[in-house]
Amino acid sequence: MILMGNEDLRVKKTITGIKAAFEALICEKEYDRITVKELCDRAQVNKKTFYHYYETLDALLGELQLELSSAYLERIRHFKLPEELDMVNREFFLYSAEQGMAYEKITISGMYHAIRDEMIADVNDAGWGKSENFNRLTNYQKRMLMTFINNACLGAYRQWMTGGKHNDHTEGTRFPPFPSHLAVIYVLHLFHLVRESRHKEQRGHNDG
């Protein structure tokens, strides 16, 4: 249950307690070893209360995914892609730096690849879906582009995490600049190739 702010105080306390206990368990063990009973014991609620709000643990995890991706999307909704991809990636690291250990585990652990892929898909659809240049690409080109960008960004994030979130004092922030600039170059190059290909096709058609 996503809290909207107008719920009864007892409901807020219950949901907040369930989510806090869930995030703590995510940090302590793999997802497939978390049980509803253990979660309820940690949150100090009975199982009937849990199932009143969530059908399964997967439903709770899905809600957590929705909250995380929605909060990030709100921060990047004004950016234009691909022109401001460096700013989008910069915001990703700034946002990630503000999150807790549960977010970090969901982002880098193989156990959470399915939910992580859903988060990435939500962000890609909302961000890149508005780009006219992106929508001119073929489906194959879109997949190739998204694979490169997502892997570059997540790979840099994992290195940043394992490196202890090294501070880049020249920027005054805690994120690596590499994936943003490389991705922008790659994206613009791909768009250039697509435009050139279309121009050649058009010239060939006109000459014929």
Image (cartoon, helix red, strand yellow):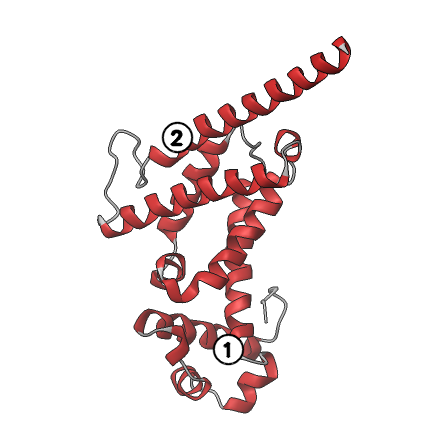
7 w.r.t. 106: above or below:
below
Quarter in which the C terminus is drawn: top right
Amino acid type, mark 1: Leu
Residue at screen point 39% across, 50% down = 96
Residue at screen point 35% across, 49% down = 97
Sequence-earlier tag: 1 or 2: 1
The outermost residue toward the front is 208
Residue at screen point 55% across, 48% down = 123
Residue underneath mark 1: 57
Label 2, secondary structure: give it.
helix
Q: Which mark is residue 182?
A: 2
**175 horizontally vs 151: left or right:** left
Q: Which mark is residue 134?
A: none
Label 1, secondary structure: give it.
helix
**199 horizontally vs 117: left or right:** right
Name the residue nearer the viewer: 68 or 82. Answer: 82
Amino acid type, mark 2: Leu
**Position in image of residue 20 (x %, y %):** 42, 72
- CA gap between label 1 and label 2 equals 38 Å
Residue at screen point 36% across, 57% down = 108
Name the residue nearer the viewer: 84 or 99. Answer: 84
